[in-house]
Image (cartoon, rainbow, N blue to C red):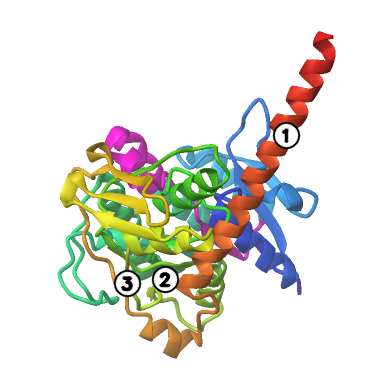
């Protein structure tokens, strides 16, 4: 029998990859979108005829109940979030409403309409924050260091409480950093690959970053959505850390991105005065800008995926190097198309002026 799935945050990076996966597996896929005057399909533009979109808002319980009634979802994947740590400092209340109370709302909607449905909550490694153990596992104590991490921790615990109190199949995936060609430019990885492409093609002079030595556990989003699906196929609901088990500095990501376009970075200076030069011509292509430092830095995130590997039979397919290369290839194509469009626009404008 064909299953129905409901995805919140379907137009985002993870939502789009998950929708593709579920469609491949024969699901009827529903997605939640906030009502807007103009529909922005974002990352699911190519899927808009294959999924059914429902107007709803994570802060509005009634709309979520309606979404459950319409979809009659067998599986619900809650990926909707204000997911940028930096923005959570500027908009702490909105972050709490969406990332915290929003989880409560969707759980209540499931409990009211179809309590037998299976629920996946997108938790985050940012809940570990000031890490209490290395690597971080499902048993590591949490110590969030941002409004985003705190809000997500509420979502994580309320999911666990509904599982234990109402005997619902509700689980959380504690996902470490996962990127892709579909990542938003506000995230450091995509900021890097977009800037490097622009520098290579002459549209930008320099990339400005904050903490180059922050260490992250980076994987590809396409691998991680497989883990989400696997979590909802088990006999019993449980929580899992999804990670690569490897850590890399931001500067490593920068070096690999520039290497892809034939530029070798040579570092000079220390702390806020550190710069990255193109070794061949001495041009400064990377600078430190203190405004990009977090108010409370998270220095090291490194997850242990052993439980997921052993119990879910989950494995990675995309390496760190391949992740960077895929993102660079995509951004070079996008920036090249942007340049071509600008040139055509100039030609049209020139013709009209004559």
| Residue 298 screen position, x and y as percent | 22, 57
Whether label 1 touches label 2, CB < 8 Å: no
Identify the magenta region: 72-101
Task: Answer few, some or many: residues within 10 Å of disc 1's Cα (few below 14, many 20 plus, some between 14 and 19).
Answer: few
Please check the rendered image and state whether residue 74 is part of the magenta-colored stretch, yes or no.
Answer: yes
Nearer to us in this view, 58 or 230: 230
Vertical side of 117 occupied by 32: above or below: above
269 relative position to 332: left or right: left
Residue 199 higher or lower than 18, as above or below: above
Quadrant of residue 295 in the image? top left
Q: Which quadrant, please, contains the N terminus?
A: bottom right
- Vertical placement of residue 54 versus 298, above or below: above
- Residue 25: x and y, percent? 72, 73
Numbered disc 2: secondary structure: loop
Query: Marks 3 and 2, how far apart in space?
Result: 36 Å
Location of mark 2 (residue): 167
| In the image: residue 292, left or right of residue 307 | left
Residue at screen point 34% across, 70% down: 164
For residue 107, which quarter of the picture?
Answer: bottom left
State the separation of the CA atoms marked 3 and 1: 38 Å
Residue at label 3?
247
Which residue in the protein does label 1 denote?
A: 341
Give the residue drawn at x 67%, y 53%.
Answer: 30
Q: Nearer the viewer, mark 3 or mark 2?
A: 3
């Amino acid at each position: 029998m064909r299953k129905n799935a409901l995805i919140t945050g379907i137009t985002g990076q993870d939502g789009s990859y998950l929708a593709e996966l579920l469609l491949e597996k024969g699901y009827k896929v529903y997605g939640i979108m906030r009502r807007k005057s103009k529909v922005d399909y974002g990352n699911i533009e190519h899927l808009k005829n294959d999924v059914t979109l429902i107007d709803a808002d994570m802060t509005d319980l009634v709309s979520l109940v309606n979404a459950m009634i319409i979809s009659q979802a067998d599986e619900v994947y809650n990926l909707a979030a204000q997911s940028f740590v930096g923005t959570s400092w500027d908009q702490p209340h909105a972050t709490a409403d969406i990332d915290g109370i929003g989880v409560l709302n969707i759980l209540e909607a499931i409990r009211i309409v179809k309590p037998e449905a299976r629920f996946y909550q997108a938790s985050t490694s940012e809940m570990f924050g000031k890490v209490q153990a290395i690597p971080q596992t499902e048993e590591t104590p949490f110590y969030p260091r941002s409004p985003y991490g705190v809000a997500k921790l509420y979502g994580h615990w309320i999911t666990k409480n509904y599982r234990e109190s109402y005997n619902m199949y509700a689980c959380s995936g504690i996902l470490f950093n996962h990127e892709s060609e579909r990542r938003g430019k506000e995230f450091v990885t995509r900021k890097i690959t977009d800037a490097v492409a622009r520098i290579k093609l002459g549209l930008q002079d320099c990339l400005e970053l904050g903490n180059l030595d922050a260490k992250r556990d980076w994987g590809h989003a396409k691998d991680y959505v497989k883990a989400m699906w696997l979590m909802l196929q088990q006999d019993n609901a449980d929580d899992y850390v999804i990670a690569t088990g490897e850590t890399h500095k931001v500067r490593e990501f920068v070096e690999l991105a520039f290497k892809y376009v034939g530029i070798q970075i040579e570092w000079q200076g220390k702390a806020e005065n550190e710069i990255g030069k193109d070794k061949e011509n001495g041009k400064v292509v990377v600078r430190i800008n203190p405004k990009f430092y977090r108010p409370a830095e998270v220095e090291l995130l490194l997850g242990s995926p052993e439980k997921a590997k052993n119990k879910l039979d989950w494995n990675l397919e995309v390496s760190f190097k391949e992740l960077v290369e895929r993102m660079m290839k995509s951004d070079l194509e996008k920036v090249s198309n942007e340049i071509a469009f600008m040139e055509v626009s100039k030609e049209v404008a020139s013709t009209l002026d004559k």
